[in-house]
Image (cartoon, rainbow, N blue to C red):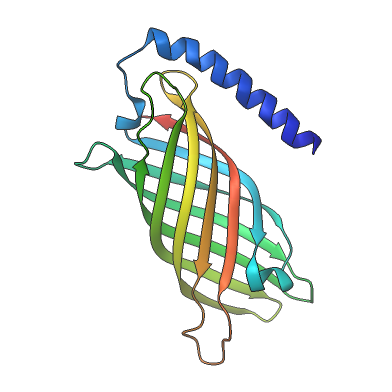
Amino acid sequence: MKIIRIISIIILILIIATGAYSRRRRGVDYFLKPQLGLWFGPITPVYTTRKYVDTNLGGGIFFRYNSPIKSLKYGIDGSYQYFESKGVNTLSLWPVYGSLIYRAPVIKQFPLKFQFKVGAGTSYVKIRPDRDHQWDPVGMLGFEGSFPAGKILNIGLRVDYLLIYEEHIDGASRNGHILNTGITVYFNI
């Protein structure tokens, strides 16, 4: 609970500070530049997956590029996620997926921007000590709030839901469900 208060205070200070900056630089829309960034935060198994593995920390990188439509971007994400098991196995995931990112229209003077994401790709799944590994399809839905912290830097919070589709495998009875939350830092290039 204390960490949430600290993060909230930091975000409030940054919003106030960037509000003054955005008034000086009115008319510049940094969302329209390609972006390269990283994220770090808790990775939480949800639904049936939480019965088998525990929450941990994870992180990843991403790249976003403009589309012909002003409020849309293309993105590619990659991350590493490691889960301790409630049994004897451990689980490692390396999801890689493409996404379409939509920036919700908000008041232009308001520095905070909201983005909705949808995507698909694949994930390398490795289970130890069983030495099982395979590539599985992945679907993703996400939400992000971000604001400029200068001319080239943005800071945000993200929430992404990953569905690791495993029911196509003979003998598999469930899919993997992971919720990624974290702080993002990305650069307008």
| Residue 52 figure quarter | bottom right
**Name of the residue lying farthest toward the left:** 68
| Residue 108 percent coordinates (x, y) | 36, 22
Residue displayed at 74% across by 63% down: 54
Q: Report the side of 67 relative to 172 (left or right).
A: left
* Residue 84 lies in quadrant: bottom right
Can you give x and y, in whole percent of width and height, for residue 23 in the image?
41, 10
Q: Position of residue 22 (x, y in %)?
A: 42, 14
Instruction: Work out which residue is located at the far front of the displayed protein and give it.
Output: 107
- Compared to residue 110, the image places residue 46 above or below, namely below
In the image, residue 165 lies at what x, y percent?
A: 49, 75
Q: Residue at x 35, y 26 (%)?
A: 30
Horizontal arrangement in the rendering, residue 7 relative to residue 36 (left or right):
right
The part of the image, by quadrant, that contains residue 71 is top left
Q: Quadrant of the N terminus?
A: top right
**Which residue is drawn at the image coordinates 68% and 81% (left, top)?**
130
**58 vs 120: above or below:** above
Single out the residue that lies furthest toward the bottom.
171
**Residue at horizontal 51 percent and vertical 41 percent from the top:** 38
Q: In the figure, 153 relative to 176: above or below?
A: above
